[in-house]
Image (cartoon, rainbow, N blue to C red):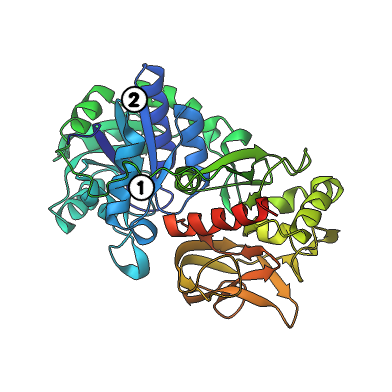
Amino acid sequence: MNPVPRIVIAGTHSGCGKTTIASGIMSALTQRGVIVQPFKVGPDFIDPSHHTRICGRNSRNLDPFMMGEDGCIDTFIRASEGADIAVIEGVMGMFDGVDGSDIASTAHVAQILKAPVVLVVDAKGMSRSVHALIDGYRRYDPTLRFSGVIFNRIGSPRHRSMIEPSLSIPSFGYIPRKEELAVESRHLGLKMAHESASMAEFGKIIEENCNLDALLAAAHNAPPMTNTINTVGCEQQAHIRIGVAFDEAFCFYYQDNLDCLKRSGAELVFFSPLNSSLPDVDAVYLGGGYPELHLAALESSRFREDLKKAADSGMPVYAECGGLMYITESITSKKTYRMCGILPASAEMTIRIQALGYVKGESVGNQSFLPASLPINGHEFHYSRIEPARDARYALRLSRGKGIEDGTDGLISQNVIGCYTHAYFTPAFARAMIGSAVKFSRQ
């Protein structure tokens, strides 16, 4: 099997400009008429939103910790069908993985996909010294397929002329400083794609300052690879509808989770808790996002009462992070706002980060619609805390991660589960959720 040509855009460190440059490359290639399939290494929701808007194709996460190596290959091959090239944006510094290891690093994913690597180097404040940095990255793991570098934040033509003579690896571009095109940040990272078009605008800078033909040629040098997961014939028909909250308040979803639900037989119905009532569905999936930025609107929305009535009648509801906060009794952020009142808990926004990192655990069973001992892999990242009732029950026991409190997560009420963990769905997870929806639909 010979999948689509592919290239990994790696960085020396967080903040070197790889997100802007990767998005600019996607934009420039798309403007040329090239069909680009975007990917993001790691458990990120925000960068993929920019990729998706730029390329017109859903960006996918590639994360060996959550998906496994075979899962990364399967997602890559399935998602890349029909594309001319895959552009994979890395995470953090190139070799930064879980707990100081290589696991789930950009380098790890590049090895899994046998993909050529382009290293983004922030040249601000350096000239000839950049070559010592590049040489160190190349020597650290000589098995990687280094194709070249892109120098970011070049201050002037003279700055470039001080770098070029000592090149030992091809340069695909010298990107001038363009601070005015930077995307604004907030507590969970960059603003979402629907709030800023700066990433797409950077495509013009890339077109003018990068050798895209050389980059395309490097991508075509990627060797064949084989998908070891056979998904042919795995699609099922359950004839149930799952409502997926999707608007400015709830917008954090792994595309693979949505695909997993569809392959397991669910029809997905997208709706806005901010602006609509509960659609005709058999279950609800509330992802994370920014409910704290829309508290007044969420409090006054009709959907809040609709969901409470549905949950009281036994409808399955699965909520993550921001969704978890929304289905508690209230959220406090300077003021206190009434929320759905489904879970016996309250939520409060905090100035300091409360949890960040990978999560690993299993379902405890006999407490929720999840079967006992179902493995759960995911990620948590939030600036809030939950105050549960003393008699609160939980669906998940974590061996890694904080969860709601003391390594427990998945607060339960009736047929509802609310987690801080952004779980990566397995087929077994999707079948359990759908099975619960089927039972509810037959009532």
| Residue located at (24% from left, 22% from top) | 213
Q: Position of residue 329 (x, y in %)?
A: 80, 64
Q: Quick check: can you spot residue 229?
A: yes
Q: Which mark is residue 165?
A: none
Q: Is residue 3 left or right of residue 344?
A: left
Q: Secondary structure at mark 1?
A: loop
| Residue located at (80% from left, 63% from top) | 341
Which comes before the other along the chain, label 2 or label 1?
A: 1
- Residue underneath mark 1: 90
Q: Is residue 311 left or right of residue 260?
A: right
Select label 2 or label 1 by which is in front. 1
The alpha-carbon separation of the residues under discs 2 and 1 comes to 21 Å
- Residue underneath mark 2: 209
Closer to the camera in the image, 168 or 441? 441
Q: Is residue 199 left or right of residue 318?
A: left
Q: In this view, which residue lies farthest toward the front?
A: 442
Q: Position of residue 55 (x, y in %)?
A: 44, 28
Q: Is residue 338 above or below residue 239?
A: below
Q: Is residue 188 left or right of residue 262?
A: right
Q: Position of residue 90 (x, y in %)?
A: 35, 47
Q: Quick check: can you spot residue 106?
A: no
Q: Is residue 313 above or below residue 229?
A: below
Closer to the camera in the image, 11 or 325? 325
Q: Mark 2 near mark 1, Cβ–Cβ under 8 Å?
A: no
Q: Quadrant of the C terminus?
A: bottom right
Tell me which amino acid carries mark 1. Answer: Gly
Closer to the camera in the image, 226 or 293? 226
| Residue located at (32% from left, 45% from top) | 231
Tell me which amino acid carries mark 2. Answer: Asn
